[in-house]
Structures are given as C-alpha cells and as structure tokens.
Image (spheres, coloured by chain):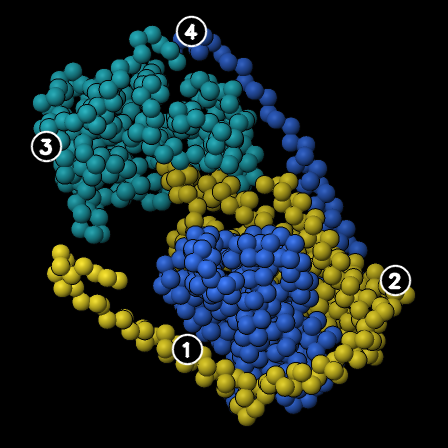
Chain colours: A cyan, B blue, C yellow
Amino acid sequence: MIRFENASVTYPGGVEALKNVTLEIPDGQMMVIVGLSGAGKSTLIRAINGLVPLTGGDVMVDGVSVREAKPKQLREIRSKIGMIFQTFNLVKRTSVLNNVLMGRLHGAGTMRSLLGWYKPVDIEIAMQSLERVGIVEKAYVRASNLSGGQMQRVGIARALAQEPTTILADEPVASLDPPTSHVVMRDLQRINRELNITTIVNLHFLDLAKVYGERIIGMRNGELVYDGTGAQADERVFRDIYGRSLTADDMMGQDAPAAAAG
Amino acid sequence: MSAQATARRARPAAPPRRMKLIATLALIALVLWSALTIDIEIDRILRLPEGLGLIFYRMFLEKGPLWSYFPEALAGMIESLQIAWVGTIIGAVLSLPLGLVGAKNVSGGFVSNAVRQVLNAIRAVPEILLAVVVFIPIVGIGGTASAYAGTLAIGIHSIGTLGKLTAEVVEGIDPGPVEAARAAGGAPAQVQRWGVLPQVMPEIVAFWLYRFEINIRASAILGVVGAGGVGDALNQAMIFRRFDRAGMIIIVIIVATILIDYVSGTLRRRIIQGAGAKRIHGEEIEEPSFVGAGAGKEGSGSG
Amino acid sequence: MTASTSSLGATQRPAKPRRSPWTIIAIGAFLVITWWAASEEFGIGFDVVRVVNNLTRGASILAEFFPPNWSYLPQTYGPMLETFKMAVIASIIGCGVALPVSFLASRVTTPNLAIFLADRGILNVIRALPDLLYALVFVSAVGVGPLPGIMALVLFNIGVVAKLLSETVDGVDPGPIEATDAAGGNRTQMVRWAVLPQVLPNYVAYSLYVFELNIRASAVLGIVGAGGIGNNINTVRRFFQYDNMSVILIEIFVFVFIIELISIWLRRRLV
C-alpha cells in the first residue's frame, strides 16, 4: 500500500508543487491522476519513488518511509516500483532486450551488470515480459528502429521485468496516436488485473481517464481536489478539477476499437 | 489481445556477433604484438613509480618552488608567448587568402582542391620538425635568431590548419549575400570583402584565438631544439639536472597557459555570441586530419 | 532614402551608432601587443626584411634536401616500427584510462562537486603541457627509449579524450538515466547502461583521432630521446645530413597519410 501523509514539495524557486496531500492507495488498484499541466500530477507520481524528494510530510511505500530512506534503501524500494515515461526513456542505440534487462539491474551484481553477463533467469524474465506485451520477436532489434507504440511497450516490459508491486506511468500515451494509446492503456489495465500490480497513471486526456480509471484523482495547484471512480466522473467533475470549461484538446476523441485488435 | 497474440510467439535467436568478435581479436592481437615486441625491459617498467616519484619530488618538493628562478622562467615564458603571438598572426594573415581560395564556392573545384592539398601537406608536418629541419638550418641558432626560427615554424604550420578551417567555414556560408554582391556588380575582391567575410569573420577569429592557445604549447617546447622560448631553459635545466629550476619553469608554463586559455576562451565565446552566429560546438571532430579548433590541445609535435 | 515625410510625420535620420568602445580597445590592444612582441628590444626581433634575406641562404640549404638519399631508408624501418608500436600501446592505455576519468569530469555522471572539480582541475593541468615536455621530463625520470615516450603520449591522450568525452557526456539524453534511477540501479550501472551506449560512437571516433595524433607525435618524441624515428632525426640533423632528413620526412608523411586513410575507412565501418 502506498500512503501520502501531508506530503508537500516546494521547489527551490518557491513553487509549491504539492500542498499537504494525504492519500492512500491500496494494493492492486488502478488509479488515474488528472489535472492541468503544472497541477502536480508529475510531482505526485515522482514522489512515490523518490525521484522528486519531499520537502514536507512523507510518503510510505509498504510501510517504509521514502523520505527517510538511505540511498541503498531507496534503490531497494525503487526496484519494486516500475516506471513508464512519456518519452519512453529507452537507450536507442542498444537492443530491445538490453533495454528490458535494465529492469533487472538492481538484482544483478555490479560486476555482472558492468560486463552485461546477466544470469539466465534474468534473461528469461526479460523475455517473458516482452511476451506479455506482445513484442518478443523484436528482442534483438535496435530500439531506435521501433515505432512509438512499440517503444512504449518495451518501456512497459522493462518495468515488468523488475517484477514490481507497483507501476507508475507518467503520461504514458501523450506521445502516441489514439489507436496506439488505447493499446497501451489496455496493456496496463490487463497487467493490473492479471498480476494485481498497483498501477498509477497520469493522464492528459479525460475520456481515456474515464474509461480506464478504476479510481480518479484530480489535482489542481498542487492540491487534491477530487477522489472518485471513473464512473462518477463526468464533465462537471472534470470542469471542477480543471477550474475551467473543457476544450476539444482535453479529449482524445477516439474510442477504443471494438474488437481486441492488438 | 486477440487469441493469436496470446499464443506464444517464437522467441528470436540471438544474432551472431562474428564481425565484432573478429575485430576485437584483431585489436587485441595488435596491442599484444606491439607490447611484447617493443624494446622495453620489464624492470624499467617496475622501477617506473620510483623514477617518477623521485623526479616529482626533486622538481617541486625538495626545496619548494624555486622562487629565485621565477624571473628567468617568466622571461622565457614571455618569449614563448611572443613567439606564439607573432607566429599565430603570420599564420592567420597568410591563411585568410589561402583559405578563401581553398573554398569550393570561391574558386571552383580544381583550384580549391589543389590549394587544399597544399594546406594538408603543410599541416602534416609538426611544428617542431619544421623548426628543426627547415628553419634552424636556415636562420641559425643564437640570440634572436632562434626565436625567429620558432616563430616561422609556428607561423607556417598554422597556415595549414587555419587555412583548412577557413576554407571549410567559407564553404558553409549562406550564398545569398554573395549572390547579391555579385548581382550589384561587385568585383571578385569586393564580393569577398562584403559578401563572404562578414559572415565568416567571427568564426575565423575564434579559430585564430584557439590556434593561439595551441601555439603557446608548441612554442613553450620548441626551445628544446633551440628555437627560442622557455623550452631552451627547460632543456638546459634537465641536462644539468637542476630539477628545481625545471619545476619552476613547469609551474610558470602551466599557470601562463591556463590563464591565457581562460582569457582566450572567454573572448572566443563573446565573439561568437556577439555575432549571433550559430554556436560552434567547437570541439567536434570532423575527420581524421582535423587538428586544431577541436579536440584538445595537441602537443607541439603533433600540431 | 527618400522618406515621405508627409504621411509619416517628420522622421529624423538616426545618428550613426558609435563604434562600441570595446572594439576600438581590442584593436588597439592587439596592435600594441603585436608591436611589443615583434620588436627588437622587448620581443623577438622579427622583421620581414630578414625573412627575405634569409630566403636565399635557405634556398641553398633546401637544395641539399634533394635528391633524397634512398639508401638510408632501410635504417629507418626499425625506428618507424617502434614509432607505430608506441602509438598503439599509448592509445590503448590512454583511451582506456580516459574513459573513467571523463565520467568523473562530467556533472551528469558525478554529482559530487569536489570530485568533479578535482578531476576537471587535473585535466586542465595535464592539458596545459605539450606532450614533448612530458617526454623530456620522463626521459630524465626513467631513461631514454620508447618507455618515456609511451608515458608522455598516455598523459596527452587522457587529456584530449577525457575532455572531449566529458563534454559529450554532458550532452546526453537524460531520459535513460532517469529510467535506471527509477529501476533502482546504482551509479555504476547507470553509467554503463544509460550513458555509455549513448557516447560510444563518439568515444570510438575520439580514440581513432587520438591514435593518429599519437602517430604524428611519436615520430617527433624521439628528438628528446623518447624513442621512435625522432632519434634518427636528431642524429641526422647533427651531422647535417639533409639528404637523409628528407627521406625521413617523406617517410613520416606517407606513413601518416596511410594511417589516416585506414582511420577514415574504419570510422565508416564502425559508425
């Protein structure tokens, strides 16, 4: 379980990105965070694995305080939390498999990872992750030769290879086209249900949020302003969260393809 | 996911890395052969730290920096700086017209190519060789003659590098203003002066400054063969095993070089930014023969 | 030029902007320094007249370079080979050491300010001295032969490659770095998997470049006794054997040229 207790983040310039957020996320939940740019979505997600350090309050992951964690402990915590990025963050010049194997780095010794001699079990886990997202046949392809959607699936595979208890996704589909976005979101949903991994996703498009969010959190100006289910969230709710009326840009505008056209 | 997708897709086999293996083995073989057949006794390698430590100690620590020798060291360094200065100017002045001619868009393929080859030939000879082989025999040694030889060596060598860089910059210009100058009826020289030069001068001046930084290093050591500057004093100090003097000289060289690098570097940046020219990531390597305005400061012998 | 003052109102012609004082100062300083550096009393006593005078004397000496004494060639094979080996060994050691040094010299891979500054500082000092100077010192420290030459070249290599590579590292895409951090990797793993793959092509290019510099440099290091063909240069010039000298020069030139060709070919294949 992940718990925020009066968590605050104030950046050196004085910007208050998070203000006293208290929040509890039970295991296995699929939670979507919505809000305007700069509302604190990214900060909230990055506070969970300590990429953004808190300046006030605390966040606990399975009872362990992230703020107090020493570097080694922090790495231990992070190894159990997979992260997916808007810009994929793949190493373009190397193979898909090597990218996924980065998820096994924490367990592999320093010497082994230096030489790239992963244990067979690590390679097996990496392959299985690739199979789970359906692109194992690209294992030895150079990452730069993939499409955007494929790259993001490699990102998901990398997160899965960590055998995580939680997956954080920071605007995972913002760089993808609508059909691919649905594919990726559905992958995340499937992983959440099949493997019972807590999944926390930042989303920009409100229609996507409504469809895939078991639970929706609304952020505005660093504060938590809404907490409800996807079913309950309607236009009025979103307008409250945004503090303005909605525009066409706020919706992706294309429904999920009816049949499962992977 | 469709049923087809959930069926196990065949895992691909790892691609063979034969070429990479062969290349690595070849490299290792080359290195081993070089290391094993070169004429160095093992015990000399073993005594290396001892020898180094001793000389480092004698240079800097035994009596502390030899401040009494500072004036002479400084005088020598100043002479080296002067050699580098005048040498760079010679190189700059002569390389400008050569560089212009060496540009394809100024003088057409054949002529520019010929000029570039000449420039390459000049560049290939390290300054110290030029000094040792050509200029010292010509002007002799002793007194001002030696500084003279060093200056010429640096100057002529710089023409090679600066000429090439100038030509490349000129080849990269926007043809618009040049066309406009021609269309307005300008003679070739005027076209150069008003159409070409304004675009390229900031970059070229930056190259000149960078070349100056490199030439300081060259001039500092040219004295070893008698071409003037502080290198001569250094050589004498080493020969007579006055390591404390050598240490002082080295300190002076380091400080002077770093200072000038700093000033020159700042000037270069101002010039580039002031002109609004596109920022040079001045340390790119373009091709193998590219020396200067780029990777680090080569020693004198490899300029 | 002919402003129609009627519709625009009276527009005054702007005053010509004064030349920035900095430019004038710069030009003035330049002239003064040049005069000082070239003058007889304070400087090196350079004047163009002398150059012209010496040209005639030069011509006769230059004539002695031709024809080259080709019978001398076989004596140079051994030293040239030694030059080549020195360059190879120095390149491997130098580029190898430069790799970790360059990571320490970039804030991207070394957040610790003290270590970073120390590394940068040492690099600056190393780069302030020419390779020939190191050779001179090392010859006194360990004796003559190729060993001091290799040592000098190694230091020189580290200076060049580490500076270049650290600047490349400064400019890498931070995305993969964030990804390794998020996955719980430590600094070494981050450098190996997020940074190194990005800079590897540059590293290879810099290494090849430095190898060529080494070839040229090791040809002259022998002048101070550090092995290679430079020794021959010394002997030959002491005895004024200009016809032998021209053989050496041509040989060096051809050798460097061939290495350059190979290097271009290699670079194309690798990238």
Q: Which element is circle 3 on? A: loop
Q: Is residue C111 left or right of residue A233?
A: right
Q: Which residue is tagged 1?
A: C27
Q: Is residue C253 left or right of residue A203?
A: right
Disc 4 residue type (three-letter): Ala
Depth check, mark 1 against mark 3: the one in front is 1
Q: Which residue is tagged 4?
A: B3
Are the residues flagged by discs 4 and 3 in contact, CB closer than 8 Å?
no
Question: How far apart are the alpha carbons under marks 4 and 2?
Answer: 76 Å
Report which quarter residue B234 is drawn in.
bottom right
Mark 1 crowdedness (10 Å alpha carbons): few <14, some 14-19, many ≥20? few
| Same-chain status of marks 4 and 3 | no
Q: Which element is circle 1 on? A: helix
Tell me what residue is drawn at x 41 percent, y 69 percent. Answer: B267
Q: Which element is circle 2 on? A: helix
Q: Look at the image and tell me in which quarter the C terminus of chain B lies.
A: bottom right
Tell me what residue is drawn at x 32 percent, y 76 percent. Answer: C21
Depth check, mark 2 against mark 1: the one in front is 1
Tell me what residue is drawn at x 45 percent, y 55 percent. Answer: B183
* Total residue callouts: 4
| Residue C104 visible in the displayed image | no
Disc 2 residue type (three-letter): Pro
| Same-chain status of marks 4 and 2 | no
| Residue A92 visible in the displayed image | yes
The spot of residue C33 in percent (x, y) is 47, 82
Mark 4, chain letter?
B
Question: How far apart are the alpha carbons under marks 2 and 3?
Answer: 87 Å
Q: Which residue is tagged 2?
A: C74
Q: Which residue is tagged 3?
A: A243
Question: How far apart are the alpha carbons under marks 1 and 3?
Answer: 60 Å
